Amino acid sequence: MTGPDYLAALLLLAGALFFLAGTLGLLRFPDVYTRLHALTKADNVGLGLIVLGLSLQSGSWLVAGKLILIWLLVLLAGASVSHLIARGARLRGIPEWRR
Amino acid sequence: MSLLQTGIDALLALGLVWLAWRALACPDLFRGIVLFIAFGLLMALAWVRLEAPDVALAEAAIGAGLTGALLLAALARLNRIAPAGTRADTREAWRNAPALLLVLAGAGLGLAVLSLLPEPAGLQAQVAAELGRSGVSNPVTAVLLNFRGYDTLLEVLVLLLALLAAWSLEAEPPRREAAPGPVLDLLLRLLLPVLVLAAAYLLWAGAHAPGGAFQAGAVLGAAGVLALLAGWRLQPHLTGLPLRLAIVIGPGGFLLVAWALLLTGRPLLEYPPALAGALILLIETLATLSIAATLAVLFQGSRPAAEPPA
Amino acid sequence: MPDLYHALTLFLLLNLGAGLWRVVRGPTAADRMLAAQLFGTTAVAILLVLAQAGGVAALRDVALVFALLAAVAAVAFVRRAWPQPEDEHDRP
């Protein structure tokens, strides 16, 4: 393993950590609005870090570009869908969590 | 195979069986659909682990993406026609017949697996030997569009039959879609061009890598489904003959090619090797258009009104 | 490196499995759909990692298709299948 390999491994592990945070959020947060964080923030950052790590490993600009395109598409879908779900939930009067 | 890989495969297998059971057994139809979407995702991953990226691609495009949307639209229709409380529960009466059928099918499959030769020869060698004359370099496409082209012809016709069945049902009044709102509108304007481009890419890639008409058609059909969901509709003058032409051009073009080849004295769908590549591309392009149009129209359900709604 | 890729795949699959609890549990339809959407992101990550691990470029195309179609089912849910606001059924 060389320098870039260690960096890539570090990025992949960090990505895995964000996925774990997203899953914990999905399971433990108290209402649908807070659970949306798992979708829009944690998992998308996790995928971004994994994409970065894999881009370093791929050794090709073409592959790296394709990986980043895939990440951007997932970001677009995740952001739009979470907005639509949150808006629909408010319209339907699903109550938000209060301490 | 390492212990980690065994763990991945075991988890996938357990997950698939559990999801299939839960999706079938749960009384709430919506929950069943969501479990089925998750099942499609895991199924695509399972095909990847079985080293069948072609099937994984088809499962990703059709199983995980479009089928979920089709089932959700069907559920919405069902809830409109017969709200949850008013449906007659047919499950009790019908539970035993499918179970018996499944046991018989399972026993048949088990017997088939047991009767396989311990070292099956497979057909890879024959396919590899003839690949040079097929017009494409992806063996899966060679089998689907050349060596066993009539299978694919029948599959395209099955899709057409499904549409005919849906269209023979009573037409629904055209639904008024709520305004899409800025977010859905922006999503559509960004995503539609990318979907069209990706469909063209998958169609072209099918000649030498996993891809082809069904995957490309599903991606293009998804573009149509998204547009329909945002409330976009075809102009009234396009819903008549032009739409029908788009739907039949795939199977129609396929049949015309088959007929032309028969006229030149060749067996059914045996292309001249020099023309094979071009003919396969032509058939797949037309099929992509028809599959996309058929899937989008199936999602809408009933026949689009030829005259503008009053 | 291959061991790291496979360990990462296994870890992501376990995440996906844990998320299934939310699909079964709900309580609202939105929660179930949200979890399914999340599985799409996880599946994309798994596919990209497996593409690098096995050197199979075609798996990136599978991931691309997942990413492209990620929004379709959820948009169909929000626009069609989600019970209308006056429906009591959807309340937690």
Image: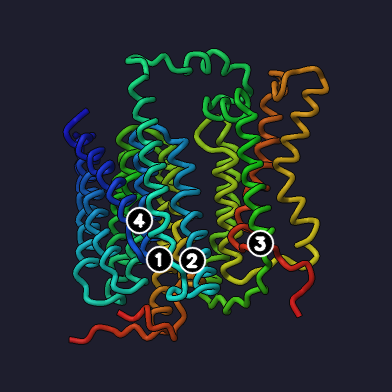
Nearer to me, B87 or B132: B87
Mark closest to the chain's N terminus, 4 or 3: 4
Mark closest to the chain's N terminus, 1 or 3: 1
| Residue at the disc numbered 4 | B23
| Residue at the disc numbered 2 | B75
Where residue B72 appears, x then y in whole percent?
48, 64
- A58 shown above or below B18: above
Asked whether the residues under marks 2 and 3 belong to the same chain, the reply is yes
Tell me if mark 4 has few (under 14), some (14-19) or many (20+) residues whose alpha carbon lies within 10 angstroms of its own. Answer: many
CA gap between label 1 and label 3 equals 24 Å
CA gap between label 1 and label 2 equals 7 Å
Q: Quadrant of residue B268?
A: top right
Nearer to me, A7 or B217: B217
> What label does residue A34 carry, if any?
none
Quadrant for the N terminus of chain C in the image: top left
Local SS, label 4: helix
**Left or right relative to B275: residue B62:** left
Amino acid type shown at disc 3: Leu
Nearer to me, A90 or B175: B175
CA gap between label 2 and label 3 equals 16 Å
Mark closest to the chain's N terminus, 1 or 2: 1
Mark closest to the chain's N terminus, 4 or 1: 4
| Residue at the disc numbered 3 | B169
| Residue at the disc numbered 1 | B30
Asked whether the residues under marks 4 and 1 belong to the same chain, the reply is yes
Q: Please name the colour scheme applied to the rendered image.
A: rainbow
Q: Disc 4, disc 1: CB below 8 Å?
A: no
Q: Is residue B1 visible?
A: yes
**What's the chain of the residue with tag 3?**
B
- B269 shown above or below C40: above
Amino acid type shown at disc 1: Phe
CA gap between label 4 and label 2 equals 15 Å
